Amino acid sequence: MLEAQEPTRVLWSSLWPHRPDDEILLELESVADETLLRFTLRTAAEYPDESQTGHLRRRLNVLLFADLRFSYGQ
């Protein structure tokens, strides 16, 4: 974790050794009776192509949401 602003914002360092300049920004936002989670890839390097973007999204999806899905038996 590079920085945090409780309770709405966390900035992670890169999860990928081959992309050390990447950062993942996680933000919570309250809208009506819901809480939205947005995660954004930030990078000073060249932006990934479509295939690599899919790989990065999948890695984040597993990291952030797999345990939740598994807790519901899926």
Image: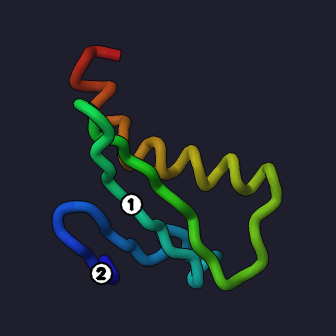
Residue neighbourhood size for the residue with mark 1, other residues' Cα within 10 Å, grouped as few (<14), some (14–19), many (≥20): some
Nearer to us in this view, 24 or 59:
24
Q: Determine the residue located farthest toward the left in the rendered image.
A: 6
* Element at label 2: strand
Residue 68 lies, with reference to residue 25, above or below; the image says above
Q: Amino acid at mark 2?
A: Glu
Q: Is residue 17 left or right of residue 67?
A: right
The location of residue 68, given as percent across then percent down, is 27, 32
Q: Is residue 39 left or right of residue 35?
A: right
Mark nearer the N terminus (1 vs 2): 2
* Element at label 1: strand
Q: Is residue 66 left or right of residue 71?
A: right
Q: Residue 22 falls in which quadrant of the image?
A: bottom right
Check contact, mark 1 vs mark 2: CB within 8 A. Answer: no
Residue identified by numbered label 2: 3
Tag on residue 26? 1
Residue sitting at x 36%, y 35%:
66
The location of residue 20, given as percent across then percent down, is 57, 82
Q: Determine the residue located farthest toward the top in the rendered image.
A: 73
Q: Amino acid at mark 1?
A: Leu
Residue sitting at x 65%, y 50%:
55
The location of residue 50, given as percent across then percent down, is 80, 51
Inter-mark Cα distance, 1 to 2:
11 Å
Residue sitting at x 32%, y 39%:
31
Q: Is residue 12 left or right of residue 18?
A: left
Residue sitting at x 25%, y 75%:
4
Q: Residue 1 falls in which quadrant of the image?
A: bottom left
Task: State the quadrant of the C terminus.
Answer: top left
Q: Residue 17 falls in which quadrant of the image?
A: bottom right
For the image shown, how many numbered marks are present on the structure? 2
Nearer to us in this view, 23 or 18:
23
Nearer to us in this view, 34 or 70:
34
